[in-house]
Image (cartoon, helix red, strand yellow):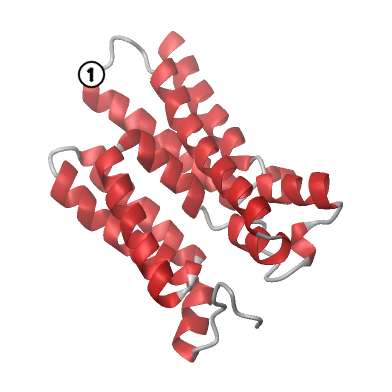
Amino acid sequence: MDAVFRVVAALVGAFLLGSVPFAVLVSRIFFKRDIREFGSGNPGATNVLRTFGPVAGGATFVLDILKGAAAVYLATLLAPAVWSADGRDWLMIAAAMAAIAGHSFSPFIGFKGGKGVATAAGAIGMLMPVAFWVLFLMFVVILLITRMVSLGSITIAIEFPVLCVLLYGDRTPMLLFGLLGGGLVVWRHHANLKRIFRGEEHRIGSAT
């Protein structure tokens, strides 16, 4: 029973951590506006960046990363001590997915939310630090070349499962996380993909 309680607490806690809508909070507390009424309407760091500037956008991005990392850390604290390493992996992966789901479908803002990239990054940083830095560098390169945050996010989401196979091929939970996490991020960017193919996607620094 203690183990069941710990698992449920870890997953519920991870979901609630992920659900904290920092983009909305930052825009309301510091600008007295609701980010959902501006730009793309997406309550995420990129829309905050475009609407309120780099400081607000950067703060939102960091906070979203931290909540993903905190969700995984909570799972490590609550994982039953008698569990095997594989069992702990499964719980941490489940907590990571719960945090990403919470960010994407936050109950605090009508089960809507951002696209989960920063929250996923925080979880990956805790679970797979090597993969995190490879993905981060790839994201920066794509962003510098194209100035499209969405294309950088989609690229690393596609790259993530490949990295999981190469770096963690003997750990089934990590492989599943790569497929599910990467797939969810790509799916959340389906509208961006259409705009990219049409040549209409927003670029950082562009007036349109």
Q: x, y percentage for residue 92?
A: 37, 31
How many labels, in total? 1
Say if 204 sits above or below 52 in the image.
below
Instruction: Name the one closer to the observer, 60 or 158.
Output: 60
Find residue 170 and report its image quarter. top left
Instruction: Name the one closer to the observer, 156 or 18.
Output: 156
Side (left or right) of 129 relative to 184: left
Side (left or right) of 199 relative to 56: left
Is residue 1 at all visible to an observer of this figure?
no
Q: x, y percentage for residue 101?
A: 53, 47
Q: Residue at x 29, y 39 (%)?
A: 128
Say if 114 sits above or below 169 in the image.
below
- Quadrant in which the N terminus is drawn: top left
Q: Residue at x 26, y 55 (%)?
A: 161
Find residue 76 and report its image quarter. top left
Query: Mark 1 belongs to which amino acid?
Result: Ser
Side (left or right) of 201 relative to 175: right
Q: Residue at x 52, y 32 (%)?
A: 14
Q: Residue at x 45, y 22 (%)?
A: 7
Q: Residue furthest bottom?
A: 198
Q: x, y percentage for residue 80?
A: 36, 13
Instruction: Name the one closer to the observer, 154 or 132.
Output: 132
Say if 167 sits above or below 142 in the image.
above
Residue at mark 1: 84
- Quadrant in which the C terminus is drawn: bottom right
User: Could you tell me which secondary element the residue under label 1 belongs to?
Assistant: loop
Determine crowd level at label 1: few under 14, some 14-19, many 20+ residues with C-alpha closer than 10 A. few
Is residue 8 at all visible to an observer of this figure?
yes
Q: x, y percentage for residue 6?
A: 47, 17
Side (left or right) of 13 relative to 117: right
